[in-house]
Image: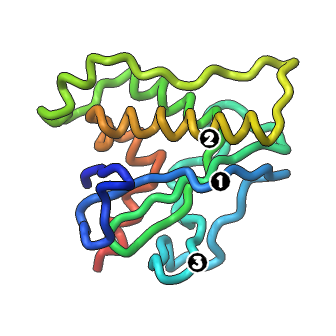
Amino acid sequence: MFYLLKEDWSPRFESFFTVTITTWMTYSSVPPSSSSSSSQTTSTESSPLISSNRSYNLTRGGNSKFPAVYYNLKVQSGRKEHLCPRRYSQFRKLYDEIKATPSPTPDQASLSASTRPINIPPKTCFCQTIDDEFLDVRQEELYHFLTSLLTTGHANHPAMIAFLELDSFSNTDQ
């Protein structure tokens, strides 16, 4: 699958996907899965469901303390979409995995762009106040970080595929 920015993407592009961070939410435990195990994605005409595909462990990344803030990533491909709730620590883990292992097949257009350093937003300090304004800014920073990775040839990296649960689209394209 190929990544397109939200402004360039259209539901008619079946082999392309886009990602947005719709909102952040505080959960007192791991966010619930979709109640239907047969439906991993949902049509854009109905309300989006959190993907029931749990190939990406929601507590992965080190932190498992609750309550916790999750950023809801809406991943769309064709007329299908799913939500992937992710913690900041999971973005950090994705960053570390991509830095540790280069993308298996970077495309030629992104080779020159991939020499630019991609920075993840900094961690919070234990004494830092985490209010709504901070979380809104962090959501924007994480979106910029994610799009930077996706536009520089990391869309097909195994860690990115697992992070965005992109396999759920190929499993439902029957």
Alpha carbons under labels 1 and 2: distance apart:
8 Å
> What residue did someone put label 2 on?
139
Q: Which type of secondary structure does the marked residue at label 3 adopt?
A: loop
First along the sequence among labels 1 and 2? 1
Q: Quadrant of the C terminus?
A: bottom left
Q: Quadrant of the N terminus?
A: bottom left
Above or below 63: residue 32: below
Tell me what residue is drawn at x 76 percent, y 38 percent: 133
> What residue did someone put label 1 on?
23
Tell me what residue is drawn at x 29 percent, y 32 percent: 152
In the image: residue 87, left or right of residue 158? right
First along the sequence among labels 3 and 2? 3
In the image: residue 52, left or right of residue 43? right
Q: How many marks?
A: 3
Q: How is the image coloured?
A: rainbow
Q: Which type of secondary structure does the marked residue at label 1 adopt?
A: strand
